[in-house]
Image (cartoon, grey):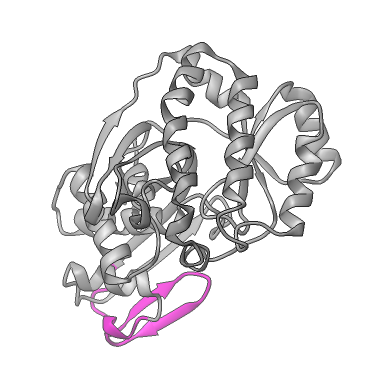
Amino acid sequence: MILTKTPVRIPIAGGGTDLPLFTKKFTGNVITMSINQYIYTYIYKRSPNTSSIIQTSNLQEVKLNSKIRHKIIKETLKYFKISEKVHIGFFSTLPTRSGIGSSSSLIVGLINSILCMKNKKISKNKVAKIAIDIERKILREEGGIQDQIAASYGGINFIKCFKNYNFSVKKISLNKNKIKFLENNLLLIFSNIKRYSSKIIRSQTNNKIKHYNEAKKEVPKIINIIKTGSKKDLGYIFNNHWFRKKKISNEISNAKINNVYNKIVQNKNFYGGKLIGAGGGGFFLFVIKNKKKALQFLKKKKLNFREIKLDYEGSRTIRF
């Protein structure tokens, strides 16, 4: 059996500028951070057997891989011309459909599982490109390209996004103190709402492009904030980003999301935050002032949260 461990990501800056509605006119700039929460994917050749088993939230057994209901798994197997009978499954350490790029991490992990099964090696860049092709061109799922790149590469990356899903990646090298600044002062807080990002993205129109230009301008500011270690300034930028983002589409926020956000941001132990991903639910990313007191507050209010650490490696496989 081959097991793949693939990180999910949080967007630090420039979120949305990797979307086609932006890159068809401008170059997008995005900073992503891969974190220590993972999609685990496994694949096993079922020989001799006459059927494949797909084990996700549901269990399916099929004679032909073309009959697999799970679109990501079916199309990824088709891309690599896998006709053999296999057993495939996956699980996540965080809720899926929550703005952390889990579907892209699943595709990247499955690609690496198949490559390992076929005893092939390709670059992280090529894996990301294949994942983008499957998710955006074959499945025609709405969205950008930062998730697939972050899942494949790991670490903290500055991604330049061009039209037709082209990109370049530059690793951002930070010393231990700057990494600790991010790890110790950022928290993921779950809104308890799951959603499909494609629906949210389809609701966005080109006349809202101004927000993404503002998000792009924030990228060098946030790089400087990380270097200077100003939590207050980072929280301020996150707040501004969220207030602008809500104006893009009525699908991005709602009364429940606003209530959760206001409950947190009004507490003196938080500097500010934003809802990550496409919106409509999922996780908030908050900058904290006093970690001990912030965690006590969240536990008292029964808000689900996750502390984060940087994942340095990106998607990797383990053969059993």
Left or right: where 307 falls relative to 294: left
Quarter of the image for the N terminus: give it.
bottom left
Tally the marks.
0
Instruction: Tell me if I can see residue 111 in this picture.
Output: yes
Left or right: where 299 falls relative to 233: right
In the displayed structure, 10 sits above or below 172; it is below
Q: Is residue 282 magenta?
A: no
**Magenta segment boundaries in residue numbering:** 45-68
The residue located at (40%, 75%) in the rendering is 70
Instruction: Tell me if I can see residue 35 in this picture.
Output: no
The residue located at (71%, 22%) in the rendering is 289
Residue at the extreme front of the image, as rendered: 207
Residue at the extreme right of the image, as rendered: 300
In the displayed structure, 45 sits above or below 262; it is below
Q: Nearer the viewer, residue 3 or 215?
A: 215
Q: Position of residue 96 (x, y in %)?
A: 54, 58
User: Which of the 4 image quarters holds residue 261?
Assistant: top right
User: Which of the 4 image quarters holds residue 83?
Assistant: bottom left
Q: Nearer the viewer, residue 309 or 88?
A: 309
Left or right: where 57 falls relative to 194: left
Q: Nearer the viewer, residue 32 or 79?
A: 32
In the displayed structure, 95 sits above or below 298; it is below
Q: Position of residue 304 (x, y in %)?
A: 72, 46
Q: Position of residue 116 (x, y in %)?
A: 21, 53
In the displayed structure, 298 sits above or below 3; it is above
The residue located at (36%, 67%) in the rendering is 88
The residue located at (48%, 78%) in the rendering is 59
Q: Position of residue 241 (x, y in %)?
A: 57, 39
